[in-house]
Image (tube, rainbow, N blue to C red):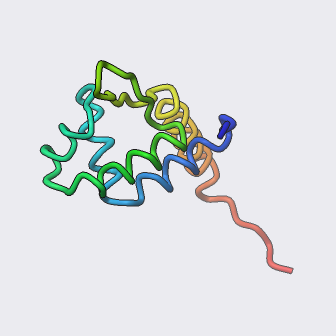
Amino acid sequence: MLISAEDDVTVVAGLLADPVRARIVRVLARGPACVCHLVEDLDLKQPNVSNHVRVLRHAGLITGENRGKFTFYHLNHVMLDTAAAQLSELAATAREHAEARRDCA
C-alpha cells in the first residue's frame, strides 16, 4: 500500500489512536525490536502484538528486517517526520488565522 506524503498525518494519527499501537511505536522509537521484545516490554500476548505489528507494517509506519529466524522492526522515521511537519504547518496556519472571522450567510 503506497501512501502519499499528504496522507501521512492522517495515517499516523489513525494508527496512534490505538493505545497498543502507540505503545509499540514508543518502544520502537528507542531502537529496533522483534515481536518477542515487544511482548516482553509491553506485557501483552504474542498474537495481539503480532496483529498490531501487521497493521503498522501494512501502513508503512514500520519496516521489518530479517535476522536469522527473527524479524526486527524499525520505525519509518521519514513518515513520522512528514506527519510532524504537516502538523506543525497546520498549527502555524491556525495561529495565523486565529482571529479571522467568516460572515454567516
State the residue in front, 81 or 55.
55
User: Where is residue 30 drawn, in percent x and y?
Assistant: 23, 29
User: Where is residue 53 drawn, in percent x and y?
Assistant: 38, 45
Q: Is residue 53 shown above or below 62? A: below
Q: Which image quarter holds the C terminus?
A: bottom right
Q: Residue furthest front?
A: 69
State the residue in front, 93 or 63.
63
Q: Residue furthest right?
A: 105
Q: Residue at x 28, y 28 (%)?
A: 70
Q: Which image quarter holds the N terminus?
A: top right
State the residue in front, 50 or 81.
50
Q: Residue furthest top?
A: 67
User: Where is residue 74 drawn, in percent x and y?
Assistant: 37, 28
Q: Is residue 27 shown above or below 72? A: below
Left or right: where 83 falls relative to 40: right
Left or right: where 97 falls relative to 21: right
Q: Residue at x 59, y 46 (%)?
A: 90
Q: Residue at x 80, y 73 (%)?
A: 103
Q: Is residue 23 shown above or below 37? A: below
Q: Residue furthest bottom?
A: 105
Q: Residue at x 24, y 52 (%)?
A: 46
State the residue in front, 40 or 82.
40
